[in-house]
Image: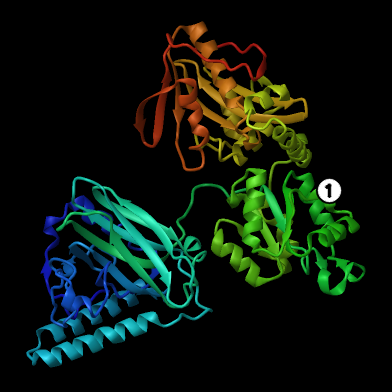
């Protein structure tokens, strides 16, 4: 929605490329509900009303306010767009888009009716013959009503949107940077701000609502601004949706994300009672909770605690119930529980989308969900369903049963690492890391299957193999498989990596590692070893496939680190090459123990 009362210009959509028009319609049927924000033209340097008489840039509109866009807000009718039109804006210096913010959601059909009615009323006010003074009064009254309605607090029972969605076509040949700012009206808090780069052509940016709620309560009055950065006079942008939206969750072909860690609240979740009020002697462990914790541990699912309590007292209570050995990196303080969730994910080095959080308080569950929507939250009343959840149906192997102890050993490594200060390579050498390389067999295929299902941050192909597919891979003579195990002076990491090389080219088609060996140079050592072997035996360049994602991008730096060059990108997969006449660099940190694996080429 926009200031239809003072913006009556329209243009056809024929000037916009057909492929861009198609993009504006792509979310039809996906956006389920949306807001109808009341966008208007504003000035970044506004000191109303003084500036109307002192500013050289003041250009009056019909309502007496300042015209901050060269042509105003030009409507481009576009039936393909979700709101049936686009707004063409030619920016003047200091011009910005502004709207009172709210998260009042309407169905797309209802929202379109609201906007259509607003356009009809605005057009009528603009076109009807009447004295200028009356037109000005009616126009100001109409927009004042829209602004007041948009500024009303929303009902706390209504659901929040999933994101703020910005659609924009940039017809320039260069990128435009635009600042999105959301600022609370009543609270003196830092505003939410995000710099959005609009590349030439169509752009769609989603700002998760979880990012916004860290800075303001979206149910209370706030303002929204979109401000171009350092643009020339006359810079033109076409805007589609600029709204908070709820989108239908897209049908995913991926399997359920398996849980890697269950995080427990304490009071009225792990035990009946409140520790600081009832005292330790009056607490009683919830029925079956100890058995549930032990079963999760046996499945290799890690566990931790996030609780608002006094740390020493809470730890003593956990020890009293003989459960302290099961909880890694417990976060017990009076800070928001979302901060504890983040700390656990960081210390375990796992994604938040592999966490399950149990709490008896719906407020705490909603707080965590608002900040980290990817975390699966479960009310403590549903604890009895935990072991039956799809997320907890993991493969159980000898190694998974020992996973908790592996993480405790890793904590010991970190303590030793601190003694080496900034000399990280010296610390790695002190660890005496040994990498064992074997081929996949019927004996280790279950652990390989588990690894392919769990790894995310260091999965360079994005593949998640079913056991039957792994068996088929074993039957192909030209596919060489590599199963990696690791240990050091502190203990064993178990099986930590898997790779497939098509020896006919040769090309590494799959490479994945457990996050437990991240930053330990294991991936560098393996790639150096495998590339060197193939080049020596076959005398050919060595290729690798890499499907880059936001999750594996930091680990993907290993490829340029060892000297691989990018050849091409096709269907989201980057083809990399290490030329046969290039020198490999081995830092000597890792000792490799490898069984002989024939480099079959049939």
Instruction: Work out whether residue 586 or residue 169 is closer to the camera in this orientation and state it.
Output: 586
Instruction: Work out whether residue 268 or residue 289 is closer to the camera in this orientation and state it.
Output: 268
Q: Residue furthest right?
A: 281
> Residue shown at 12%/91% (left/top)?
133
Instruction: Work out whether residue 482 or residue 162 is closer to the camera in this orientation and state it.
Output: 162
Counting from the top left corner in percent of width and height, residue 242 is at 32, 65
Counting from the top left corner in percent of width and height, residue 56 is at 14, 69
Counting from the top left corner in percent of width and height, residue 99 is at 32, 73
Position of the N terminus, as image quadrant, is bottom left
Task: Using the image, determine if residue 348 lies above or below residue 562.
Answer: below
The reply to whether residue 460 is in sight is no
> Residue shown at 12%/56% (left/top)?
15
The reply to whether residue 260 is in sight is yes
Number of marks in the rendered image:
1
From the viewer's perspective, tell me whether residue 495 is left or right of residue 602: right
The answer to which image quadrant residue 432 occupies is top right
The answer to which image quadrant residue 526 occupies is top right
> Residue shown at 83%/48% (left/top)?
325
From the viewer's perspective, tell me whether residue 534 is left or right of residue 166: right
Instruction: Work out whether residue 593 or residue 388 is closer to the camera in this orientation and state it.
Output: 593
Counting from the top left corner in percent of width and height, residue 425 is at 63, 25
Task: Using the image, determine if residue 428 lies above or below residue 302.
Answer: above
- Where disc 1 sits, the SS reads helix
Task: Using the image, determine if residue 245 lies above or below residue 386.
Answer: below
Task: Using the image, determine if residue 491 lies above or below residue 540.
Answer: below
The answer to which image quadrant residue 371 occupies is bottom right
Give the residue number, with chain letter if any, for mark 1.
Answer: 325
Q: Residues within 10 Å of mark 1 (few under 14, many from 20)?
A: few
């Amino acid at each position: 929605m926009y200031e239809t009362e003072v913006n009556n210009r329209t243009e056809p959509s024929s000037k916009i490329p057909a492929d861009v028009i198609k993009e504006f319609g792509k979310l039809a049927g996906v956006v389920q509900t949306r807001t109808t924000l009341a966008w208007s033209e504003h000035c970044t340097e506004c000191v109303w009303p003084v500036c109307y008489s002192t500013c050289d840039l003041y250009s009056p509109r019909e309502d007496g306010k300042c015209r901050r866009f060269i042509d105003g807000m030009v409507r481009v009718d576009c039936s393909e767009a979700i709101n049936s039109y686009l707004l063409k804006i030619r920016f003047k210096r200091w011009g910005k888009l502004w709207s009172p913010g709210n998260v009042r959601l309407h169905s797309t059909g209802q929202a379109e009716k609201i906007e259509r009615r607003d356009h009809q009323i605005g057009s009528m006010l603009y076109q009807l013959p009447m004295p200028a003074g009356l037109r000005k009064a009616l126009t100001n009254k109409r927009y004042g009503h829209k602004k007041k309605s948009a500024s009303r607090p929303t009902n706390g029972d209504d659901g929040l949107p999933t994101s703020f969605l910005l659609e924009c076509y940039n017809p320039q040949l260069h990128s435009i940077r635009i600042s999105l700012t959301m600022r609370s009206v009543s609270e003196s808090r830092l505003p939410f701000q995000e710099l959005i780069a609009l590349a030439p052509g169509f752009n769609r940016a989603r700002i998760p609502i979880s990012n916004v709620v860290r800075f303001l309560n979206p149910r209370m009055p706030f303002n929204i601004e979109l401000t171009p950065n350092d643009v020339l006079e006359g810079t033109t942008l076409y805007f589609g949706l600029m709204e908070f939206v709820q989108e239908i969750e897209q049908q995913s072909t991926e399997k359920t994300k398996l849980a890697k860690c269950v995080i427990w609240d304490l009071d009225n979740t792990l035990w009946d009672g409140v520790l600081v009020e009832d005292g330790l002697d009056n607490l009683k462990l919830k029925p079956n909770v100890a058995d549930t914790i032990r079963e999760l541990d046996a499945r290799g699912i890690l566990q931790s605690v996030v609780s608002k309590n006094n740390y020493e007292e809470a730890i003593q209570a956990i020890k009293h119930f003989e459960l302290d050995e099961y909880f890694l990196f417990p976060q017990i303080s009076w800070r928001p529980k979302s901060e504890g969730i983040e700390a656990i994910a960081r210390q375990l080095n796992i994604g938040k989308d592999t966490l399950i959080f149990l709490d008896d308080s719906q407020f705490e569950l909603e707080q965590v969900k608002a900040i980290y929507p990817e975390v699966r939250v479960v009310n403590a009343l549903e604890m009895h369903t935990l072991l039956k959840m799809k997320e907890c149906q993991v493969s159980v192997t000898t190694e998974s049963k020992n996973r908790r102890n592996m993480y405790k050993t890793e904590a010991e490594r970190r303590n030793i690492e601190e003694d080496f200060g900034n000399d990280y390579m010296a610390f790695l050498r002190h660890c005496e890391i040994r990498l064992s390389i074997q081929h996949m067999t019927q004996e280790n295929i279950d652990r390989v299957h588990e690894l392919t299902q769990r790894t995310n941050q260091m999965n360079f192909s994005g593949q998640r193999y079913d056991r039957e597919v792994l068996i088929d891979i074993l039957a192909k003579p030209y596919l060489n498989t590599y199963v990696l195990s690791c240990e050091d002076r502190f203990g064993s990491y178990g099986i930590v990596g898997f790779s497939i090389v098509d020896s006919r080219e040769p090309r590494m088609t799959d490479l994945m590692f457990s996050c437990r060996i991240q930053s330990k140079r294991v991936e560098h050592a393996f790639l150096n070893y495998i590339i060197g072997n193939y080049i020596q035996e076959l005398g050919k360049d060595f290729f690798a496939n890499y499907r880059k994602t936001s999750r594996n991008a930091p680990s993907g730096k290993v490829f340029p680190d060892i000297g691989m060059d990018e050849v091409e990108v096709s269907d989201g997969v980057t083809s990399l090459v290490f030329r046969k006449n290039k020198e490999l660099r081995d830092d000597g940190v890792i000792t490799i123990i490898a069984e002989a694996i024939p480099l079959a080429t049939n």
